Image (cartoon, helix red, strand yellow):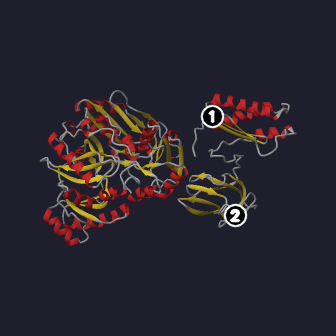
């Protein structure tokens, strides 16, 4: 889906600059760091007239939208400070790709070599054939062209979506029950090892 | 009132509908094909959903994808615009079954006027004159020939499920009639999934005059005056104006009454247009009714001050019409030019590509309905309409002066457009004096 996002490339470049600056900062109270990070992001937004920013780091995932209260989303991991600074700054240095946002989907680094499985239709995405069953695939699942990877429900019809490719799932970009549009990327796969 | 509307269309009409919804405080969902993904007007919608790749069959004509998009975005209504699915009865039916309000007539009314032969029968029953013709579907070549001899050539073979100037072929003699029957049936089968054709006498030197109808779901039906659409090329309208310079108030009265009779006879609701041909002796003949909003609706909006799209939405939401017939006023003269991405110097061949510079005209009485802008890429997959230039002034003479002036300002570079063609055409004496008929453009092109 399209939201009012502008200046995405500029954001990535600016963010790298901030990352370098903070490299050697002392790790203190993680909540204070989060607040400082959020303040910096708001500054970036204001300077570049952005409507929305979403940022994910090992210890912080933040989404800021103009005119709405800031949503601080604590990650599923514990909030203990990262003990080694190099890993922290390494994450900051990694290129942040702001792709099309969708409701609640996780965003991470996109590797150009990964295979995409895109939705061939408009509808609602389901990981399994019904709530009681196991998901068709998970991270690490090996798929072949005929492997059913998900259901997309449209007009009360549950359509089984086949992988139509070979590889192993490294990322699932959509959540169970989320609406998807035509062409929306659902899964990222690693190609089979040569 | 409706709270969320999905716009099942693209380009200038999608933008038109988005604008009306926004002013009414209604949330909007736009749908788009991959080819239209970067169009600016999508940013105006509250949500935009990609429904498929470029080909219309897989996107703007794809009912399952559009209904699916409507479901996942939780809209309560769909506006179909014009073209695409606007007059597709099954689409209106599916909306009705899915509890989605279809902003247009009910499917049964659409069906009655969608079959052009049926519509002619309804007109006859309601004392509205029709062109001499078969009055029914022709399947037999012998029957066709006999009829053509009785009517006298030239005759027109028309698709029963057609409309909008499509699926029509003229035959001048027996041999061409046999050919045209086959060609028209084949075209109709492909374009309208129904090869049924009928035959009419060709009306020469006629004007095309149509009447705008609005009807609510409470039994109120009004007309909003006529539009003269005689300036056409290959049955596609190029310039439309209101009032028609070729009819007097007596004929206007007859046409508008006839239009209302037909709309009421089919139980029509929402916006629709009843089309007539008017011959040189001011006799009028019903040809078809279009169960949709028309491209040229802005000229009616300018002279009446009525926002037709908002009225459509209100009617669909169950409200009564905003005004009664006696309150409708007609002020001044409005003229619209359809600007197409076509090269008039090369047989009007379509000219897709990137618009490198787009300078819009402005000033008093000038309205431009367009989705285009500098940097916009006109795609080859859809029709070539890039915008509509509408002028509105107190008199026709002033309207033409305004049109001349605004066309001279209007600059589109990077692609060919029909702007230069209009600049020439509207200088022609035959256009200026208003004494034109449906052959005017052909004669103008032949002479230049």
B225 horizontally vs B18: left or right: left
Mark-to-mark CA distance, 1 and 2? 38 Å
Is A130 in front, or is A81? A130
Instruction: Describe the element under mark 1 as helix, strand or loop.
Output: loop
A150 horizontally vs B355: left or right: right
Direction left: furthest residue: B281
Question: Which label is found at residue A68?
Answer: 1
Question: Which label is found at residue A133?
Answer: 2
Pointers 1 and 2 in contact (CB under 8 A)? no
Instruction: Describe the element under mark 2 as helix, strand or loop.
Output: loop
Residue A98 is situated, as x and y percent measured from the top left of the image, at 66, 42
Q: Is residue B248 visible?
A: no
Residue A133 is situated, as x and y percent measured from the top left of the image, at 69, 64
- The residue shown at (26%, 49%) is B274
Direction front: furthest residue: B218
Residue B427 occupies quadrant: top left
- The residue shown at (25%, 34%) is B329
Tell me, yes or no, whether dots 1 and 2 are on the same chain: yes
Q: Give the letter of the chain under mark 2.
A: A
Q: Quadrant of the N terminus of chain B?
A: top left
Q: Residues within 10 Å of mark 1 (few under 14, many from 20)?
A: few
Q: Quadrant of the C terminus of chain B?
A: top left
Q: Give the letter of the chain under mark 1.
A: A
Q: Which comes sooner in the sequence, label 1 or label 2?
A: 1
Residue B277 is situated, as x and y percent measured from the top left of the image, at 20, 50
């Amino acid at each position: 889906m399209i939201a009012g996002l502008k200046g995405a490339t500029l954001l990535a470049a600016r963010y790298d600059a901030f990352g370098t600056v903070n490299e050697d900062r002392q790790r203190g109270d993680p909540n204070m760091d989060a607040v400082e990070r959020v303040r910096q992001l708001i500054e970036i937004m204001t300077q570049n007239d952005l409507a929305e920013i979403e940022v994910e780091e090992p210890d912080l995932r933040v989404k800021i939208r103009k005119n709405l209260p800031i949503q601080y989303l604590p990650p599923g991991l514990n909030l203990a400070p990262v003990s080694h600074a190099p890993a922290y700054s390494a994450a900051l240095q990694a290129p942040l790709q702001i792709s099309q946002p969708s409701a609640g989907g996780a965003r991470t680094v996109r590797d150009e070599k990964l295979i995409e499985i895109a939705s061939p239709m408009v509808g609602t995405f389901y990981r399994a054939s019904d709530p009681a069953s196991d998901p068709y695939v998970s991270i690490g699942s090996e798929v072949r062209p005929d492997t059913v990877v998900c259901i997309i429900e449209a007009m009360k019809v549950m359509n089984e979506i086949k992988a139509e490719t070979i590889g192993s799932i490294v990322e699932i970009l959509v959540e169970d029950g989320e609406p998807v549009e035509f062409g929306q990327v659902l899964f990222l796969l690693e190609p089979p090892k040569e | 009132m409706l709270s969320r509307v999905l716009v099942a269309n693209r380009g200038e009409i999608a933008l038109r509908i988005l604008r009306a919804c926004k002013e009414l405080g209604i949330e909007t969902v736009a749908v788009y094909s991959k080819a239209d993904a970067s169009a600016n007007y999508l940013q105006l919608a509250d949500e935009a959903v990609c429904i498929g790749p470029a080909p219309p069959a897989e996107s703007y004509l794809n009912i399952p994808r559009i209904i699916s998009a409507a479901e996942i975005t939780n809209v309560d209504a769909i506006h179909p615009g014009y073209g695409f699915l606007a007059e597709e009865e099954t689409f209106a039916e599916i909306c009705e079954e899915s509890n989605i309000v279809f902003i247009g007539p009910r499917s049964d009314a659409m069906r009655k006027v969608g079959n052009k032969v049926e519509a002619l029968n309804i007109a006859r029953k309601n004392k509205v004159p029709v062109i001499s013709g078969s009055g029914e579907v022709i399947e037999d070549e012998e029957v066709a020939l006999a009829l053509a001899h009785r009517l006298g050539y030239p005759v027109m073979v028309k698709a029963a499920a057609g409309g909008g100037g499509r699926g029509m072929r003229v035959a001048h003699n027996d041999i061409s009639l046999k050919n045209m029957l086959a060609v028209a049936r084949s075209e109709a089968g492909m374009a309208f999934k129904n090869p049924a054709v009928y035959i009419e006498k060709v009306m020469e030197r006629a004007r095309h005059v149509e009447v705008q109808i609005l009807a609510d779901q409470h039994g109120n039906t009004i007309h909003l005056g006529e539009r003269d659409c005689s300036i056409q090329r290959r049955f596609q309208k190029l310039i439309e104006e209101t009032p028609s310079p070729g009819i007097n108030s007596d004929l206007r009265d007859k046409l508008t009454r006839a239009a209302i009779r037909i709309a009421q006879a089919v139980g029509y609701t929402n916006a629709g247009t009843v089309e007539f041909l008017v011959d040189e002796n001011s006799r009028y003949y019903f040809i078809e009714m279009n169960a949709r909003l028309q491209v040229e609706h802005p000229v009616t909006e300018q002279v009446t001050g009525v926002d037709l799209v908002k009225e459509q939405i209100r009617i669909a939401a169950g409200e009564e019409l905003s005004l009664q017939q006696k309150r409708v006023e007609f002020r001044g003269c409005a003229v619209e030019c359809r600007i197409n991405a076509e090269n008039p110097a090369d047989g009007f061949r379509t000219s897709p590509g990137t618009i490198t510079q787009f300078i819009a005209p402005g000033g008093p009485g000038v309205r431009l309905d367009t989705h285009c802008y500098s940097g916009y890429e006109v795609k080859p997959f859809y029709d070539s309409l890039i915008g509509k230039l509408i002028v509105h002034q107190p008199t026709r003479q002033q309207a033409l002066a305004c049109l001349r002036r605004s066309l001279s300002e209007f600059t589109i570079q990077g692609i060919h457009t029909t702007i230069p063609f209009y600049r020439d055409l509207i200088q022609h004496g035959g256009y200026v004096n208003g004494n034109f008929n449906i052959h005017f453009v052909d004669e103008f092109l032949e002479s230049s």
